[in-house]
């Protein structure tokens, strides 16, 4: 019975911070193939957080739109094959030049919108 439970992936926790700058509000809308998490409105340094259990088939994908000051950008905020090995708790800072994955050494690894 223990082996069966080891196949079930650990829950992933995604936290998205508005790091655009003081006075700039961010609208976030995240979805997967099966779930629409709705629009979230974030003031500067506020965050939106969600949890889910990744697929045993390693194909979980959550993508988000980010809107501020008349600009809209998209980013795959969770790609199981990319993210599962490294972050059961992913903390993303959304900046004008793109999302930045924060790690526990206070470093932020930049990514780019598409």
Image (cartoon, rainbow, N blue to C red):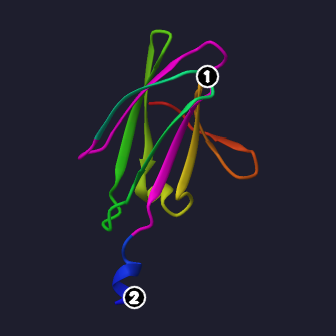
Separation (CA) of disc 1 from disc 2:
44 Å
- Circles 1 and 2, Cβ within 8 Å, touching? The answer is no
- Residue extending furthest toward the right: 105
Position of residue 50 relative to residue 69, above or below, is below
Magenta stretch? 9-35
Rendered residue at 38%/39% (across/down): 63
Tell me the crowding category of disc 2: few under 14, some 14 to 19, or many 20 or more residues within 10 angstroms, Cα based.
few
85 or 14, nearer to the observer: 14
Labels 1 and 2: the sequence-earlier one: 2
| Element type where label 2 sits in the image | helix
Position of residue 84 relative to residue 90, above or below, is below
Rendered residue at 62%/12% (across/down): 23
Rendered residue at 55%/54% (across/down): 89
Position of residue 10 relative to residue 73, above or below, is below
Rendered residue at 37%/80% (across/down): 5
Does residue 43 belong to the magenta stretch?
Answer: no
Q: Give x and y (percent) for residue 1.
A: 34, 90
Mark 2 lies on residue:
2
Does residue 15 belong to the magenta stretch?
Answer: yes
| Element type where label 1 sits in the image | loop
Q: Give x and y (percent) for residue 53.
A: 37, 60
Mark 1 lies on residue:
44
The quadrant in which residue 62 appears is top left
């Amino acid at each position: 019975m223990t082996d069966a439970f080891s196949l079930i992936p650990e829950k992933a926790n995604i936290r998205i911070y508005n790091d655009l700058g003081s006075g700039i509000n961010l609208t976030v809308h995240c979805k997967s193939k099966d779930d629409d998490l709705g629009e979230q409105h974030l003031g500067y340094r506020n965050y939106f957080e969600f949890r889910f259990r990744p697929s045993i088939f390693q194909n979980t994908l959550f993508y988000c739109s980010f809107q501020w000051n008349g600009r809209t950008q998209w980013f795959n905020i969770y790609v199981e094959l990319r993210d599962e090995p490294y972050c059961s708790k992913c903390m993303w800072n959304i900046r004008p030049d793109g999302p930045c994955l924060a790690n526990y050494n206070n470093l932020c690894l930049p990514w780019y919108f598409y």
